[in-house]
Image (cartoon, rainbow, N blue to C red):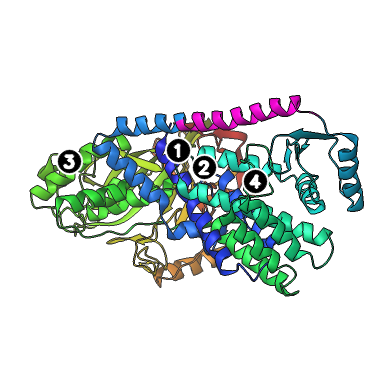
Amino acid sequence: MDIWKVLEYTLAVTTVGMMIWLVKLFFHDKLDARWHYFIWLVLLVRLVIPVDFALIHTPVSVLQGIPLSRWIDLGRLAAGRKGYQEAAGLLGKIYLWGVALLGGYYFATWLVLKLCLKNAPRADESTRGYVNGIAEKYGLKTCSDIRSYHCNAPFICGLVRPVLVLPQGRAMPEEAVIVHELLHRKWKDVSVNVAIRIVRVVNWFNPAVWFLTGVVQNDSEALCDQRVLEYCREGMQKDYGDMLLAMAEKGAGNPVRTGTSNMANSYRNMRTRIRRICDFRKVPPGIGVVAACITLMLTAAGVGTGVAHRGFELREFRTDAELQKNLWEAEIYRADTPEEALWLFLQAAAEHNVFYRAAVLPQRETAAFEAFAEDCRNKGILDGKGGITVDSIAASTGQKDYFPQETTGIWQCRIYNLQYDGNQGTATVYAELGNGHEEAQYTEWKLELEREEGWKVRLVGDTGRRTGEYREPPMLQGSLRTGDFLLEAWAYNEAYFSGFGGMQQRLPDTWGNMPYGQDALGKDYFPDHFTVEYRVAEYDITYLGEESLEGCTVRVEITENGKEAAEMPTPEEAAAEASAEAAGEVYDTGSFSGDGYCVAEFDGKELIPGEPRGIGGGGSGFVQPGQGWNTDTELRVHVRIYVDGRLVVEDEAVAVAERR
């Protein structure tokens, strides 16, 4: 049994229940018994849903201001690190034993009572006539089974076939007493008793829950008192209250058993009921709107889940204990999406920050990582915010798996081919190194993602520093030989974050204008999806024929899924394009498109046999995830090739990209 989940659940129930109780204290004489009773429905909803289940998002939530989940996760982590797992397991067993013992006790008392009532004598005709006459007088449904039993006050027993139990050998109960019990039957208040027992069984070790369920039970009786006064004659509040006090003072109540009602309680609980009786019909008529507003606010605060804060604060540390605590705070952070986990990994790489890295490190590696962070501190290369202050982490610490080899001078990152299901995923990161060299330099990281409490990231491939042109890794690829031409096609997803840390992302018009930073509370916050993502398809054409194409014009049209190809620009449009490019302006000729087509024209001598030429391609950008290529997608294209305006190739099923 996971004792930590039990603690989180019972603390959440206690928090919401105490909030309701405090509000009830404030409005004790301003709202009637119905409101005081039915407001507990907010707690009922909180009882039946898991703590971490976001039923609704509300601007205000009592559970948002009290980070129960974080406290419980820290306790669980501390117990694991300190070697108290067995103690936690023992507490779980003790909890289950408590549930079994208390549940067994309640069931045994109910069973004994049922057997006793089964053997108890049925009420005589005069008693039945008396009860039936009262029921008929007030339009209430009577009980078909009325028994006499050794008890101090009448009560109802049972849910399906309720039995009215009257004291044996005593005077006939007063009319109001019978009405009270018949109203319990009408409104099925015995079910409240059963629900209270279930709640107490589940939360048997929590005294606050026992107190709150006692208040619920008393409010149920107070509401029944109010209904009695509504059914009976005007002005009988004093007589009815005196009768309840007399029953309580004489100990006329019964020990409340599972599956029963009880009219008389202790003198202490009776005070609330008497106060409600005195306030009967004193509630202003227009208070219903106020009560409804209060109920809605309590529901939002108690049941709703506030908008989750996606981030954690990087606190400075001075001691080993503070370093360990900060690492634990990071380790319990849950990245809800793979994109968020990737952002944290990139942030860790950009800043060499151990706390960001701990937030998305698989749990099986966290203990070793804590030792690594402590070693960095001992070597004097870890600053107060968790940043490693050397350029080559691997050379200084001997580690190769937590951080990439090359992170100095990174000025932009692209994420390629992020793919994931419910439990795992993969991605490739291209990081361009802007270190002043004329030649382009970059590094590539292969990442694996897995889901635990949140998404985690493992570095499984690292090229180190590379020089030259980077070729995007294809997710889908395929080729087709048709006539004298070879068509090659590939597709990939390319994604960006607009900015983080010291890295500037290559996005038009967003050079650092949309960095992720801090919210109004001063805490870091992290994106749960990419700023921009592209679905890209590109093509190459190679001429393999023997006949010379010199002096010929070759036009290639590529379309996806039967879409029409774009028109080539006219000579005037081509001249305007050249002029715009010379002036440094952006000019879209429509020669390629993200809508699934591209067109290119070549001078025949460009198509040297055996040398591929790029036709172009295109990508469609979007912000929300899930619209790119995936490994179950087929890139089906077809090609039309014209030589001097004459169609020489048209293949209706040109290529199906093969998954790599």
Q: Are marks 2 and 1 in contact (CB under 8 Å)?
A: yes
Q: Amino acid at mark 1?
A: Met
Indicate yes or no whether the magenta region holds residue 303.
no
Q: Are marks 2 and 3 in contact (CB under 8 Å)?
A: no
* Residue 371: assigned label: 3
Earlier residue among tags 3 and 4: 4
- Say above or below: 104 vs 395: above
- Say which of marks 4 and 1 sits in front: 4
Residue at image coords 32%, 47%: 359
Earlier residue among tags 1 and 3: 3
Residue 99 horizontal/vertical position (percent): 49, 32
- Say above or below: 138 vs 276: above
- Examine the image and state in which quarter residue 524 appears: bottom left
Q: Are marks 1 and 3 in contact (CB under 8 Å)?
A: no
Callout 4: helix, strand or loop? loop
Mark 3–mark 4 Cα distance, whole angstroms, equals 64 Å
Q: Amino acid at mark 2?
A: Trp
The one nearer the camera, 140 or 313, is: 140
Callout 2: helix, strand or loop? loop
According to the picture, the residue beneath numbered tag 4 turns out to be: 253
- Binning the other alpha carbons within 10 Å of mark 3 as few (below 14), some (14 to 19) or many (20 upward) gives few
Q: Are marks 3 and 4 in contact (CB under 8 Å)?
A: no
Q: Amino acid at mark 3?
A: Ala
Earlier residue among tags 2 and 1: 1
